[in-house]
């Protein structure tokens, strides 16, 4: 157990602005604000093109987290809330986005966002958030056909991974790769509750297990928990993952091995974005979907 005062759970926050767009020349500026239990994202689109985004930590106050995510996204651009034509809030805190014109569920927004990011061939989307896990089946336009959610237990989600990062004193972004540094898969950590899972891990450490073996046991348990949900719905290809867990290859590789299906490569469907080197962050999928809904609703409002 490590107690250095360092916050190993704290993942790097980020923001980005498209250098090729002059937002003042845009006809429709839409925003998507995804307030989750662990992270919040803001995406600003200009005429349906990605202009800027942020990916930041959710605080204890959902309205403040929404404002903070927006301010971080538009930093240095000159955009203010008054410049937005339509804003859609999504995520568990969607009804608490103070400047949103509409709230839309994260199911619909992740479906729409995954379709836009990964391409129209995507048929199954897995989103693992801070507190829950969702499997969404979509059509070629990103419309939801069916979905399943797990129980809200953080042992199989981002919050559980954060807890293990602090317990073992390993930066959260390194957990996945370290969990793969085992010659064979150990027995799974059995508990579905993060509190009991941590207790089990402490006992394994005391028994002499190295950290990579404990992480392998936990990442494997997480993958099996996700697989049990995926197994309840017919997973069709292409299979895409959204949310921060895609950055943990220890979990992703174990999920795909159990499924026997490869996951979509984390790259833009839009070749221009690839050629220009635009950063691809699967955590902004929900906010992108919300911004796309915002654009459609703004245009509908104008036409009416």
Image: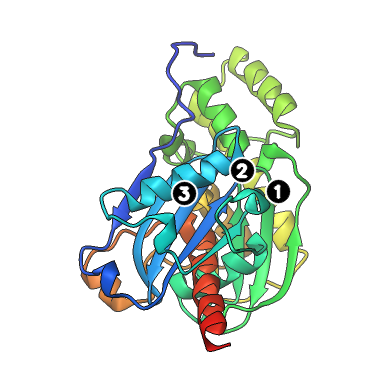
Q: Quadrant of the C terminus?
A: bottom right
Q: Which residue in the structure is indicated by mark 2? A: 130
Disc 3 versus disc 2: nearer the observer: 2
Spatial separation of the CA atoms under disc 3 and disc 2: 17 Å
What's the coloring here? Answer: rainbow
Mark number displayed over residue 171:
none
Q: What element carries label 2?
A: loop
Horizontally, residue 259 falls left or right of residue 278, namely right
Precedes in sequence: disc 1 or disc 3: 1
Q: Is residue 238 visible?
A: no
Number of marks: 3
Q: Dot 3: within a 10 Å radius of its alpha carbon, few (fewer than 14), some, or many (20 or more) residues?
A: some
Residue at (48% x, 65% y) in the render: 288
Residue 195: x percent and y percent?
Answer: 72, 25
In front here: 246 or 14? 14
Q: Can residue 272 be seen in this view?
A: yes
Precedes in sequence: disc 2 or disc 1: 2
Mark number displayed over residue 249:
3
């Amino acid at each position: 157990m490590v107690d250095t005062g360092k916050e190993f759970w704290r993942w790097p926050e980020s923001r980005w602005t498209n250098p090729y767009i002059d937002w003042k020349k845009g006809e429709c500026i839409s925003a998507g604000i995804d307030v989750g239990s662990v992270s919040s994202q803001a995406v600003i689109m200009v005429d349906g093109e990605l202009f800027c985004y942020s990916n930041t930590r959710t605080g204890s106050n959902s309205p403040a987290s929404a404002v903070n995510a927006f301010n971080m996204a538009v930093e240095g651009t000159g955009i203010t809330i008054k410049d937005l034509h339509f804003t859609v809030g999504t995520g568990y805190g969607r009804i608490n986005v103070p400047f949103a014109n509409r709230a839309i569920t994260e199911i619909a927004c992740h479906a729409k966002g995954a379709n836009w990011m990964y391409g129209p061939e995507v048929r199954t989307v897995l989103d693992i958030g801070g507190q829950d896990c969702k499997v969404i089946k979509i059509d070629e336009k990103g419309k939801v056909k069916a979905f399943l959610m797990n129980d809200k237990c953080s042992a199989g989600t981002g919050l559980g991974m954060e807890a293990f990062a602090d317990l073992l004193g390993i930066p959260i972004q390194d957990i996945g790769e370290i969990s793969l540094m085992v010659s064979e898969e150990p027995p799974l950590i059995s508990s579905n509750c993060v509190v009991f899972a941590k207790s089990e891990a402490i006992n394994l450490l005391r028994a002499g297990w190295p950290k990579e073996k404990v992480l392998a046991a936990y990442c494997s348990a997480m993958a099996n928990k996700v697989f049990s949900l995926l197994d309840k719905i017919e997973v069709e290809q292409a299979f895409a993952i959204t949310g921060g867990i895609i950055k943990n290859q220890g979990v992703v590789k174990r999920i795909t091995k159990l499924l026997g299906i490869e996951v979509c490569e984390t790259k833009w469907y839009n070749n221009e974005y690839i050629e220009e080197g635009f950063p691809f962050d699967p955590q902004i999928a929900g906010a992108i979907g919300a911004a796309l809904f915002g654009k459609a609703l703004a245009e509908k409002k104008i036409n009416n």
